[in-house]
Amino acid sequence: MVERTDEVAAQQAPSGDTSGSAPDAGEGPAPARALQSLPELLRWVWRQLTSMRTALLLLFLLALAAVPGSIFPQRGTRPADVTDFLSRHPFAGPLLDRLSAFNVYASVWFAAIYLLLLISLVGCLVPRSLRHVQALRGVPPVAPRNLSRLPAHDSFVSSRSPAEIADSARQLLSRRRWRVVIRDGAVCAERGYLREVGNLTFHFALLLLLAGMAISSLFGTRGQALVIQGDTFTDTISRYSSFGAGRAASIDNLPPFSFTLTRFSATYEEQGAQRGAPRSFRADLLVRSSPERPGHPTVVEVNRPLVIGSTKVFLIGHGYAPHLTVRDGVGRVVLSSAVIFLPRNAMFLSTGVVKIPDARPSQLGFRGLLLPTAGLDPVAGPVSTFPAADSPALLLVAWKGDLGLDNGVPQSVYTLDTTRMTQVGGKGLRVGDRWALPGGLGSVTFDGVDQYATFDVAHDPGKGLVLVAALLALAGLMVSLFVRRRRLWVRASPQAGGGSLVEIAALAKAEDSGLPQAVSAVLTALHTPPPPSSKANRSEPQ
Amino acid sequence: MHPSQRAWPTVTRRTLLAAGTSGLLAACAGAGSTAGVAAPSDRLGRVIPVAARRIRPSINGVTLDGRELDTRSWRGAPVVVNFWGSWCAPCREEAPQLRAVALATLPLGVHFVGIDMLDDPAAGKAFMEDFKLPYPSIRDDDGVIETRFGAAVPRAVPTTHVLDAEGRVAVQFLGKITVAGLQPTVLQVLSETNPRLGPASSAPVGSRSPASPGATGSGR
């Protein structure tokens, strides 16, 4: 991408090696020699760390280290999947867990790479920027003694005097936006300072990018909310189904917006091989900037999030919530609401549990299977044949006993711990059906099916910075790729018998195939008025 | 990308509050220890000095048994506000303790109100009956009451606040409460307006009764 600038390189020009790849002093035989003293070793380590090569390597490592984050479920976003993964991989799971595979972006090794990259960039950029500021304020370097040893050089004999040549060369180069100075009779010019500016911009933009990412992960929050049609979600921590906040995030200051899911609609492909494939999702919301303000209607679709300040609300999924009415053995209504079931396949076969801890005479628990469009497969048994709730059926298995809720140990609302319960029976229900539980335990009525939508609520304060940084990096990179840093010297020495020998030579900081052309362009311009006896040996005749 | 084509975010609702991905949430979880001990942390469970009380949430709504309730009519006495849900295991465990504190302090003029969170109304009502809670609860379906607590918004269920006689948040308990943790605090807040009822430093709190307000009266 970029080499280190090396201001000394030009002065050493006669060596011909000007590509800036001059090795850092002491880099070669480093460790053995450096180990001789601790300060030397530390200096060597610092030089290694702040070399551009290391920065690039670390950048690559950072990208590589992010890969497991997309392979394994992450605690921050999919905690339940992590639990699931751990239970399915009893050996590899805990091992991966110890390696922070489920919390990649907060892991020690990720942080190590990140911090090293940060140090490397800063350690490289600060001295380099200082040098560049000096270079910007300085004047082009003196001409090497022997211009003909530079990689691009040319000469001709002019009838004009050396002073005239120097003067017209100075004017010519100034006009072409070179920085020019006449030193020891030679015209010294330099241009392309923007290249290093672009270069530095690119690397500072990388730093900004890292800062933006850090701000997002420190101050950002992300949560998921399941909202049944007709219900209201309020942006407080207790109403999220899962919630993750950066270490420095102030959750007290969550913008307390709220929205009511007035309507959720989904359409599916009705015909052909794609039957059942989702075609559109739409959530109609009534959004309030604060729970007690009047709401305004808003539509949220899959790639059209709701934006409230720096918070975005994405529609990421949906599902069904069968509405049940449960009476216990003494005839009390102990539940009358929609219970969220989680979809298990593309046809929205969904599972869920119902817990009735206050039923008498015994606590009740149900495991349920909801089939939005119920069908009976001769092999697989009850299946759902279409994702829409066209012909819903609910299969329930009832348990009685101790739900395990009363000892204070929290449990998932999606799991039923039946270790201290006994199964009392099962039943398939259609909408409107009532199931009288055996043994006078009560009854269950399947009232209907409600829809719910899943929202991802992300507060990402560093996002703007990341965008700006990315654009800056791009701009800086383009500048550094297209602008060439060149130095050019014109020396006119008096010839015996009048006139002068004009030598032109140029040097580039990096690989620059256009250098000979630059020299010959200057030569041509200085050559006019008409060339009497050009000694221009290698220049293309014009 | 269509939502259903993505890996489903299998979320463990509510529980997460408890199971806890972040330290804060974990506090609700099992331990609840923060609330159980007398002086848990600087921010929680400790009585905020009168001058520093800034949050004055108004609590009004329809109770689970269908009556209008507005805690403004209770000004002049402390109010204990308990955020709970019948689905919440720590709430079920703390309910008998809450009941004990309520039975001991209601006769002293302290008021109690429950805020039933994310719950089915029928299930909530059955919970109140089962645990024989001697005070009303109201529902907060749209989060209005909760957000009125501002910086003291319940970060987990259960959360218990004690409001002073002027309705300002004086104490906040995150997680399960215990008699030993809550009752002296309630009495301390009560003593701000009624010094005779202040908590004795040594006397067992349970023994206190309205008939014989064991006097530690300092200002009288």
Image (cartoon, rainbow, N blue to C red):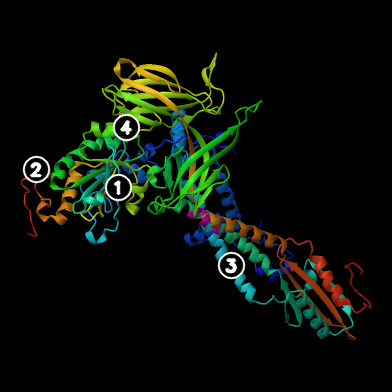
Disc 2/disc 4 C-alpha distance (Å): 34 Å
Left or right: B205, with A2 as reference point: left
Question: From this viewpoint, is residue A75 visible?
Answer: no
Establish whether labels 3 and 1 are both on one chain.
no
Ranked by sequence position, the earlier of labels 1 and 4 is 1
Ranked by sequence position, the earlier of labels 2 and 1 is 1
Q: Secondary structure at mark 2?
A: helix
Q: Amino acid at mark 4?
A: Ala
Of the two numbered discs 2 and 1 in the rendering, the one whose residue sits closer to the viewer: 1
Disc 3/disc 1 C-alpha distance (Å): 62 Å
Residue B167: percent from left, percent from top: 24, 54
Disc 3/disc 2 C-alpha distance (Å): 75 Å
From this viewpoint, which residue is outermost toward the front? B67
Q: Secondary structure at mark 1?
A: strand
Establish whether labels 2 and 4 are both on one chain.
yes
**Residue A18 picture quarter:** bottom right
Residue at the spot of label 3: A129
Q: Chain of mark 3?
A: A
- Residue neighbourhood size for the residue with mark 2, other residues' Cα within 10 Å, grouped as few (<14), some (14–19), many (≥20): few
Residue at the spot of label 1: B60
Q: Chain of mark 4?
A: B
Q: Amino acid at mark 1?
A: Asn
Ranked by sequence position, the earlier of labels 2 and 4 is 4
Residue A277 versus residue A430 in the image, above or below? below
From this viewpoint, which residue is outermost toward the right? A532
Of the two numbered discs 1 and 4 in the rendering, the one whose residue sits closer to the viewer: 1
Residue A239 lies in the magenta stretch: no
Range of residues picked out in magenta: A208-215
**Residue A176 picture quarter:** bottom right
Task: Identify the mark at residue B123; answer none if there is no mark.
Answer: 4
